[in-house]
Every structure is written in structure tokens, then in C-alpha cells.
Image: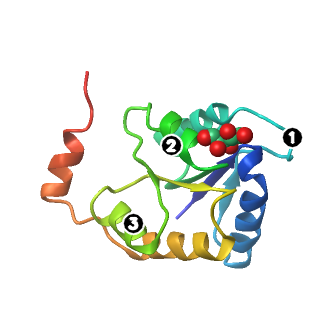
Amino acid sequence: MKIAIASDHGGFELKQKLITYFKTQNVPIDDLGTHSPDSVDYPDYAHKIAAYILNRKADLGILICGTGIGASIAANRHKGIRAALVYNNFVAEMAKKHNDANILVFGGRTMDFDDVVSYITTFLNASFEGGRHQKRINKIEME
Ligand code: RB5
């Protein structure tokens, strides 16, 4: 399992904490930036991690902006990206079981580090149920 992570300035602090956490867990993680707390534009990082996932350079993306909203909107413009703004453990479980999300989105200004670690762990421990949920995923894309 290779994870990629990206954020704007609103998610920078949480991103750095998560990178430290994953390193202590010996989980490989690619940091796609931003690399300082200076102001940047969240779509740049959403598009960067979306391309990374679509090119199969990582299995899961973690994307953070201030609220998670702008990053979610931007990432989900990419065909094949299913970016889930996860805000509790039930949603984390469903994001895997029903939505087979390939990017998890968090709010750096709205969520606590410990809660986010818990959401990620819940997601990683769940399995996509396929079946009717795969059929629904197939219906998401429009020409
Ligand atoms: C940046 O100030 C902020 O707008 C951004 O991080 C995000 O919350 C947008 O949805």
C-alpha cells in the first residue's frame, strides 16, 4: 500500500503530522506538497494528487485544505477519481465499502489529527463490497 499526500497551506500542519505518523508506522508515503505554510491555491494540489492516483503512482491519496471542501470539488473533476470528504468513522467505513474512494479529503482547520488518523485506519481496514455498489460507481461518469 503506497499512500500519496498533498495539501494547501490550510492543510499543511495536518499533512506534516500525518507524514510523521505514517513514517512511524513504516507506511511508504509520497509528499506532493505544499512544502511550507505559505499561501498557495488548493486546486493545484488537488489536480496534482488526482493525476498521481490516476497514473497509479500510489494506491490511495490523502488531500487536505482548510475545510476539505475546495479540495474535494477540484479532485472530483477528474474522471476516475472518487474523493471522499470524510468526517467521522461511519463515513470513513462507507467511503471504502460503498464508494471505493481513491482519495480521502480532510479539513486542516476543522479536524483533529487523532480523529483523522482514526478515520484513515477505519477506511484502510474496510473492504469494497462491489456488486450493486460497483454498478452505481459505473454510473457516476458522464460523457
Ligand atoms: C484557503 O484559505 C482555503 O480557502 C482552502 O484551504 C479551502 O478551505 C478551500 O475550500
Provide the residue designation for mark 1.
38
Q: x, y percentage for residue 79?
A: 38, 32
Apparent side of residue 120 relative to residue 133 in the rendered image (left or right): right
Mark number for residue 72? 2
Of residues 119 and 21, which is closer to you in this image? 119
| 99, above or below 51, in the image | below
Q: Position of residue 74 (x, y in %)?
A: 52, 34
Q: Type of residue at label 2? A: Ser
Can residue 55 be seen from the camera position used here? no
Q: Give how far across and how far down residue 18 sits, in percent.
A: 70, 66
Task: Tell me which label, 2 or 1, sits earlier in the chain.
Answer: 1
- Residue at image x 62%, y 36%? 48
Count residues near mark 2 (Cα–Cα under 10 Å), then give few for <14, some for 14-19, many for 20+. Answer: many
Upstream in sequence: badge 2 or badge 3: 2
Q: Which residue is mark 3?
A: 91
For this view, does 42 lie left or right of residue 86? right
Q: Given the image, on which type of amino acid does mark 1 rest?
A: Asp
* Ligand 1 is within 8 Å of the C-beta of the residue at disc 2: no
For numbered disc 3, what is the local secondary structure? helix
